[in-house]
Amino acid sequence: MMLPVLPFLIPLPATWLVKAICATLRVQVVRGDIEQRVRARRPNVIYAFWHGHLFYLMYRYRGSGVYILVSQSRDGEVLSRILHRFALPTIRGSSSRGGRRSLLELVRRARAGASAGIAPDGPRGPRYQAQLGIISLARLTEVPILPVAVGARWKIELHSWDRFLLPLPGSRVVVAYGEPVVVPSAADAALLEQKRQELEGKLLTLTAEVTLATSPSMPASPGQRRHDQRPDETPSPSRRGVG
């Protein structure tokens, strides 16, 4: 059981840890032009990523103002405080607690032009299984969902339900984007389920791609960057380098 004082003590050293590790990573971005193209057409997107891939993404999107959906649990309180230190505002809620309120708040923010970040398999899994909440948000706001996955060559995977991915210092990291999932506002239940499966399939494909790209048997790209590249910087067509 987490002591009441820990949510106040953990965020600062955890933030230092994330920054210290991520500053050393050698980042390669695959199909970053997809994000550029989508963002050029409209002011906001809904980023979709597996719950276990958040470590590097919170650093990558630091200062971007993307609203991250975080559970109302004590662990969620710690995570929320860490995200705020990266200038990533949070909306608290999940499918089990505060789901309707958090969805309405996300809808309001998205309609006002803000981007959102959601782990569709969170907050408690099952791992790599997308839930319908993110699809409902896309239907209500007509904002496209942009899938993204992260892989690391040198890493620790925690013994948690999401196998949280912790890149080790100096690791090669690959970030891959997929084509957006667009949900029509008039979508019925059958189409919503179809879109859920589409998003889950794209995330699974991206996950397999970054896992293969960061396996020890795969050589690093000759032009691979040694440091992070912010989302607002101009990438090459095949490489971009949160939150």
Image (cartoon, rainbow, N blue to C red):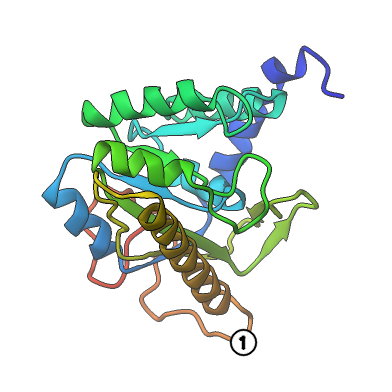
Q: Is residue 103 above or below residue 117?
A: above
* Residue count near mark 1 (Cα–Cα under 10 Å), binned few <14, some 14–19, many ≥20: few
Say which residue appears at 13% left-offset and 51% top-offset.
40
Could you tell me residue 76's position as x and y percent? 63, 28
Q: Does residue 43 appear in this view? A: yes
Please state which of residues 152 and 128 is positioned toward the viewer in this rendering. Answer: 128
Q: Is residue 74 above or below residue 230?
A: above
Q: Is residue 243 visible?
A: no
User: Which is more toward the observer, 111 or 184?
Assistant: 184
Dot 1 amino acid type: Ser
**Above or below 190: residue 172:** below
Q: Quadrant of the N terminus?
A: top right
Quarter holding the C terminus is: top left
Q: Determine which residue is flagged by label 1.
A: 217
**Image location (x, y in percent) of residue 183:** 29, 51
Query: In front here: 180 or 235?
Result: 180
